Image (tube, rainbow, N blue to C red):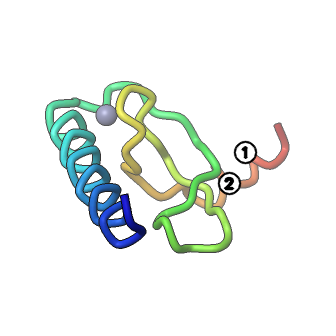
């Protein structure tokens, strides 16, 4: 397989995977969350601290400064 075909196949695969993740996240009720260091986007260089659902890994909220302090102390 040539490079362009390979890239096209991978992009198609990624799109399918992203859609599958999105469907799972839409079905989730995000009942359990944890503060985690995450990258908000694939191309962002530095991680940020966010509330992330334990079940589906969706970013569901921003921590308050108090919660951030607690996170870094632990
Ligand atoms: Zn969830």
- Left or right, 13 with reference to 41: left
Q: Quadrant of the C terminus?
A: top right
Q: Ligand 1 falls in which quarter?
A: top left
**Residue 51 vertical position relative to residue 30 in the rendered view, above or below:** below
- Left or right, 17 with reference to 72: left
- Residue 27 position, x and y percent, is 15, 32
The structure residue drawn at horizontal position 48% and vertical position 63%, both measured from the top left corner, is 40
As measured in the structure, the alpha-carbon distance from the residue carrying label 1 to the one carrying label 2 is 5 Å
Q: Quadrant of the N terminus?
A: bottom left
Task: Provide the residue designation for mark 1.
Answer: 71
- Left or right, 70 with reference to 39: right
The structure residue drawn at horizontal position 58% and vertical position 53%, both measured from the top left corner, is 38
Does dot 1 land on a helix, a strand or a loop?
helix
- Residue 18 position, x and y percent, is 27, 50
Task: Provide the residue designation for mark 2.
Answer: 68
- Between 29 and 70, the one lying in front of the other is 29
- Residue 68 position, x and y percent, is 68, 54
**Dots 1 and 2: beta carbons under 8 Å?**
yes
- Residue 15 position, x and y percent, is 24, 55
- Left or right, 45 with reference to 5: right
**Residue 20 vertical position relative to residue 29 in the rendered view, above or below:** below
């Amino acid at each position: 397989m040539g490079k362009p075909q390979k890239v096209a196949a991978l992009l198609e695969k990624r799109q399918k995977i992203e859609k599958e993740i999105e469907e799972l996240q839409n079905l989730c009720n995000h009942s359990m969350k944890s503060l985690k260091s995450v990258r908000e986007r694939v191309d962002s260089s530095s991680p940020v601290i966010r509330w992330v659902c334990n079940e589906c890994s969706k970013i569901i909220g921003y921590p308050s400064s108090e919660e951030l302090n607690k996170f870094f102390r632990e």
